[in-house]
Every structure is written in C-alpha cells, then in structure tokens.
Amino acid sequence: MTPLLGFAPDVDPTTPGVIVACDQVVPFEAGMKTAPAPVTSGLAAVAADTRGGAIVRNLSSAATLYVGTAAKLYKAGSTTYTDVSRGANYTLGTDDRWSFCQFGDSTLASNITCVIQKAVSGSFADIAAAPKARIIEQSLGFVLAFGTNEVTYGDAPDRWWCSATFDETNWTPAVSTQCTTGRLVGGSGPITAAKRFGDDVIAYKYRAIFVGRYQGPPTVWSFTQASYDVGCMGPDAVVETPIGHVFVGEDDIYVFDGTVPRSLGNGTVRRWFNANCSPLYRYKTRMLWDRSNSLVWIFFASTSASEPDSCLVLHVSGQALKWGVADNVCQTALNYVTAAVTYDGGSTIVTTYDSGPAIAFDSAFWVSGSAVPAIIGTDKIVKTLTGTAAASSFTTGDYGDDEGSVECTGVRVRFTTAPTSATLQGFYKTEEGIVASASAAGSKADGKFDIRQSARWHRFQCSMVGYAEFTGVRPQMQPHGTR
C-alpha cells in the first residue's frame, strides 16, 4: 500500500503517493480525510456583509464573539446579535477591515476611518486620544497600532504607535509612560499586517518583515528588518501556529519563525496557487488556525472571483507538511466557541433526531466551550466547519512505466473510516505529458474497486459520499507487453 503524501500538484505526477487534484479533502496525522461541511451555529444572519470578527476572552475567561460591518459592530448572543456600536455609525471604505484585540477586560476594535474603539461589557466608544489604525495588536502591556492616522502626523501607512504601558486609553507620547511612535521606512509600501510572536510583534509590508522587540525607554519598541524581499499581502493573511507565522506572500505561502521566512509551497503547491489565486485580490486572503486539527485554512479569491471562494488547507503537525483543498466562500474566518447544544435539550438547530444537523456525535461542536473553525459567507451566517462531509474526491498521480504496458485489474484504497459510498474512475495514457483518457468506473466492493484497463500509465479518481479517512492506495498491476 502506497502512503498518500497529500495534495501536491507541482511534483512529478509519477511520485508514489502523490495526489494531483482533490475536492473537499484535507490532511490529518495518518493520511487524508474528507473535509468538514459548514453547518449553522444557530446564530441569525448578520445585518450586512461582514468586515472581520473575533472571539475574545475577558479576565473571567468568558468568550464573546464580535462581528463588524461597514457601519456597525455587533455582539453575538445565543441566537441573535446586539448592536454595540458607538453612538454614530462607522463609515468603512470599500476594502477596510476591522482589527480586534483583547487587553485585559477591554475589547478593542480599529479601522482606518475611526479612532480605536473600546468596550468592556456594553457598547463600544471612542478612545478619544487614540489614533485611527488599520491594525492593532497587544504585547507586554502595550497596545500597538499600525498604519495610523492622527492629528500630529496625518495619514501614515508606515507608522506605528504604542499606548502607555498598561493603559489603552493613553496615547500621549511621554518617556514616563512609554507611549511613543515611529515609522517602518524599510521596504516599499504600507504596513499590511501585524501579529504577535511570543513577546515580540511582527509587522509586515508587501515585501518586508520587521521584528518588533521591547527595549524599554526611551526607544520602547525597536523594529529590525528581517526580510527585504518577502512580506504579507493583507491583514487577515497571517496566522500564528506552532511552527511560526504562516502567511501568504506575493508569490508563495511562507512560514516565519522569528529569523527568516521560508517557503512552504515551493515544490508542492506554489505553481498551482499562483495559477489559481487572483493576483489582484490576493490581499483579501483570510486565514484561520484550527488548533484542534493542526490545520491552517487559507481562503483566497480564485482567478474568476473578487472575494475568497477557494481554500487551501495545510496540516502542520508531524515531520511532513501536507496539503488539501476545501473550497468555501468566506467573508470572515474565526474560531467559534460553542455553546451547550444537545439533542435532548433542544435548540435552534436541533428539533428532532431526524432533522438535526449532519454533525458527528463525537464532534467538538457538541462540547460547550470548544473552539471550532468557522466561517461567515455571503449569507452572513456563522457556520462551523464541523458537519459531516458531503461529496468529495481525490485524484492520484500516475502509476506505470515509460517502457512497458501494464494492465490494471483493480485498485484498493486503504480506508481507515469507510465512506457511505465510493466510486473510482480510471484514466490511462500511453505517455507522460499528454491528456489521459477515461475508462469505465467501478464502485467499492469488498474493500476494492474492480476496473480493467491497459496502458503505460494509469491514474485514478476516487469520488466519495459521506465522511471517510484514507491513508493509502494500491493498484493491482501486471505486465502487459512492451512496444
């Protein structure tokens, strides 16, 4: 049985175990599995298209979901949202996004059209002295704002500010409070993203990376440029993982471990990603770290779309990285903290056993307080990625030999969890580099697929219905002459 290596369309298709195409298939520790389907969380639809959201926890560990639109900020309840905007509406521009961070019991939200907002338990309000900021982050008792606009320096896309230490409301520069500001003039363009990295804060431009480290007064924060060629495309295009920051750059997917950026896609998905991701809208990429499954979800706009409608999925646990594909439309990606939902307790999504959602009984969805990956699409509804898989498929690389013809009489797929049903379509060709022809398809029976075809090279597409886990493929081949 040849172990599956994951989705790797850039490698030689004759590499044993490679998957050259897949749909709704993601990696896990032992192999590959069908991707979870989005299912409603029970929350009503947000009133307008979402421009960002976050689950935050206060000092009592209470988790709260906030979602922002172009005009409002909303706080999620069990089934509905409460408008927690300041007195006046917000006026975000076409591409403006909300940035959130938690500072003790204070939830902070920012965008470039209004000063930083603060809420403790009720509605948000202006922090009058704060700058407007495209991105906010917190570390070591400071709130850091990036890409700012305020009275003294005006609109400065390469400027950063830090608040007074342990005071998110004080933005008056002073050595005594350590509130200060500076610019990141290296690299070209504006600050595009910022993310905490341990006690440091990493700031990104399109082709530059800066490591911000606390130095104490008078400098307070010192930024050192770590890359002069690689950067991050957008504010939501970076996540923190155990291997470092995983982010989407101008031409690849990278990891930054605090020293140098390193390609994650080169040799496996880089060429495919550049061919299928819109360069014009790459800055709209939304990323999500799914801690419980060790998965990085990368939602991006395809070449035929202007908003994220496709998704690459990266598994980062273990020695070898593996990729999958699970396309979904995504306006906002977040980790949703589940409430207590049971079949016998009743809820907005569960009424009877027969009409309940297609979610596995052992899913984390049913465990109160579990953090599960979720997306908000064009329907404006929070949907958790916890549902039972619907249709999915994967296509193997090529099995055979350049010289001799071989006959395939069947294919076994090592299912550790078998799908509800599965069929396998065979393809064959006389040489590499040409389009393969389809042969007859076979259904799974007795743990294998019975097909018969003869050629130099053979490829197989397995289509499944229902949840499945699978780890390897073995075609039954025998020599069939030479030419």
Image (spheres, grey):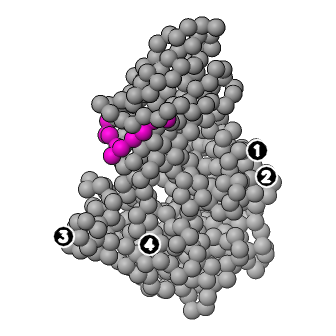
Q: Which of marks 3 and 2 is nearer the N terminus?
A: 2
Q: In this view, does 221 lie to the left or right of 183?
A: left
| Residue neighbourhood size for the residue with mark 1, other residues' Cα within 10 Å, grouped as few (<14), some (14–19), many (≥20) | some
Q: Earlier in the sequence, mark 3 or mark 4?
A: 4
Which residue range is magenta in the image? 416-425
Proximity of marks 2 and 4: CB atoms separated by less than 8 Å:
no
Proximity of marks 2 and 1: CB atoms separated by less than 8 Å:
yes
Amino acid tagged 2: Gly
How many labels were placed on the picture? Answer: 4
Q: Earlier in the sequence, mark 1 or mark 3?
A: 1
Decide which of 339, 107 is in the foreground and name it.
339
SS assignment at label 1: loop
Decide which of 401, 171 is in the foreground and name it.
401
Q: Earlier in the sequence, mark 2 or mark 1?
A: 2
The label shown at residue 186 is 2
Q: Earlier in the sequence, mark 4 or mark 1?
A: 4
Q: How far apart are marks 3 and 4 (CA)?
A: 26 Å
- Mark 4 — residue? 65
The label shown at residue 130 is none
Amino acid tagged 1: Tyr
Work out whether 170 lies above or below 56. Answer: below
Proximity of marks 3 and 2: CB atoms separated by less than 8 Å:
no
| Residue neighbourhood size for the residue with mark 2, other residues' Cα within 10 Å, grouped as few (<14), some (14–19), many (≥20) | some
- Mark 1 — residue? 228
The label shown at residue 344 is 3
Main SS, magenta region, reads strand
Residue 428 screen position, x and y as percent: 58, 26
